[in-house]
Image (tube, grey):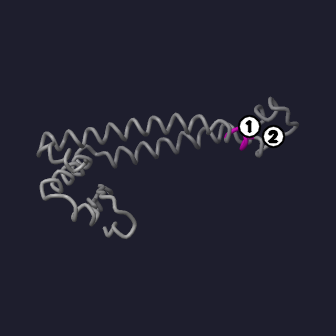
Amino acid sequence: IDGSRRSTKSNAYFSGFGKKKRIVLYDTLLKEFTEEEIVAVLAHEIGHYKKKHVLISLIFSIMLTGFMLFLFSLVVDNPKLSQALGAKDTSFHLGLIVFGILYSPLSLIIGLISNIISRENEFTADMFVKENYDGKFLGDALK
């Protein structure tokens, strides 16, 4: 990818699944890194593929979306909730406000869990490089 138009940072990522898998290397990475460092970065991205990080993340996102929609369905148009909050009739708008209030702390917790999973995935991909190539070159590339 011609990333140098948008940033001076070097980047690479793995995306897709099935027949549409790809590893993307930014042009800045190819210009600035040695051949050994590029191979180490490629090995890191292959580690994400071998450990199925994209597929697991997709499944996690689908489950999270289902969970949030389930919570939304419990709160919106809930006559007992509307009554407990002092409304005479069932109120969609009141349920929406309550969901918004509940979503904020849930979003924080979900964000923390997502960060933990992301860091674990990066560590696992780094270990893949160490086990299958040479971790020193990945360390050099990350400096």
**Horizontal side, residue 74 vs residue 130: left or right:** right
Residue 136 image offset from top left, x and y in percent:
14, 43
Q: Amino acid at mark 2?
A: Thr
Q: Amino acid at mark 1?
A: Asn
The residue carrying mark 2 is 90
Asked if residue 98 lies in the magenta stretch, the reply is: yes
Residue 130 image offset from top left, x and y in percent:
15, 40
First of labels 2, 1 by sequence position: 1
Per the rendered image, the range of residues in magenta is: 95-99
Residue 112 image offset from top left, x and y in percent:
47, 35
The residue carrying mark 1 is 78
Q: Residue at x 12, y 54 (%)?
A: 36
Question: Marks 2 and 1: CB-CB under 8 Å?
Answer: yes
142 in relation to 101, above or below: below
Residue 30 image offset from top left, x and y in percent:
22, 63
The answer to whether one can see residue 19 in this image is: no
Would you call the spot at circle 2 few (<14 residues within 10 Å), some (14-19), or many (20 or more)?
some
Residue 126's label in the rendered image is none
**Horizontal side, residue 109 vs residue 128: left or right:** right
